[in-house]
Amino acid sequence: MIVFGAVLLLAGLYSFFIGTNEVLGIQPRPLGGSLLVIGGVLLIIGVTRRIRARRDSPETEPIGGPVRRIRAVPRLVRAAGRGYPGMRRRHLGLWALAGVYLISPIDLIPELLPIIGFTDDAALLFWLVGDISNNSGRFLNWERRASAEQRAVTDRTPSGTDGSTGRDEDPSN
């Protein structure tokens, strides 16, 4: 949402200050002003949502390079289906809808409109790639913490839980 808001802000600035041609019968100044307002609102909403999500998420720092993050995406999808706390199933639905929208020939804003026609696709693509990268990095962090906690629990369990000392004893004594 932040990227889409920024793209609309830039398109609004261009239309408001530089644009000379009408778009769908709308003069450049009113169109630019409208895009500036919509882009600004989306930008504020996006930043607010990101701040809240980081504050509420236990895994705030993504880790791993691009290759590790790409490899983690299938595990992330499986874990989200099983209840991974860092991602809801509806978020996976948003990824699927974004992918379908990007490859489908149907477009909300046709490419016939200069500048604006490609901005919805570009903004959606930037959001999708960034969100997948960010969430897979957080998932890697969660996996690392979970495996460290599992190792700590395993290390704390005594080796002789059946009452033995854990040492090899000679049964002939």
Image: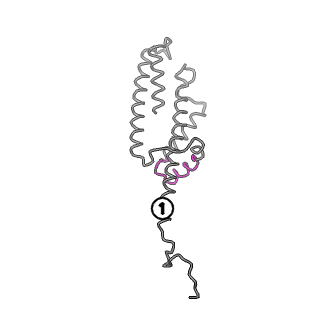
Residue 79 among magenta residues: yes
- In this view, the residue in front, 108 or 128, is 128
Q: Secondary structure at mark 1?
A: helix
Q: Crowdedness of circle 1 by 10 Å Cα count: few (<14), some, many (20+)?
A: few
Residue to which mark 1 is pinned: 152
Number of dots carrying numbers: 1
Mark 1 is on which residue type? Ala
Residue 167 x %, y %: 54, 77
Residue lying at 56% horizontally and 42% vertically, measured from the top left? 65
* Residue 116 at x, y percent in the picture: 52, 22
Residue 131, position in %: x, y?
51, 39
Left or right of 129 in this view: 34: left
Prevalent SS, magenta region:
helix
Q: Is residue 46 above or below residue 68?
A: above
Q: Position of residue 26 (x, y in %)?
A: 46, 15
In this image, 112 relative to 35: left or right? right
Q: Which residue is drawn at the image coordinates 51% and 75% (left, top)?
A: 160
Q: Look at the image and tell me in which quarter the C terminus lies.
A: bottom right
Q: What color scheme is it?
A: one colour
| Front residue of this view, candidates 127 and 151 | 151
Is residue 149 found inside the magenta-colored segment of the image?
A: no
* Position above or below: 25 against 40: above
- Residue at 45% in and 28% down: 5
Residues in magenta, as a range: 72-89
Residue placed furthest toward the bottom: 173
Establish if 153 lies above or below 163: above
Q: Nearer the viewer, residue 163 or 27?
A: 163
Q: Is residue 58 above or below residue 153?
A: above
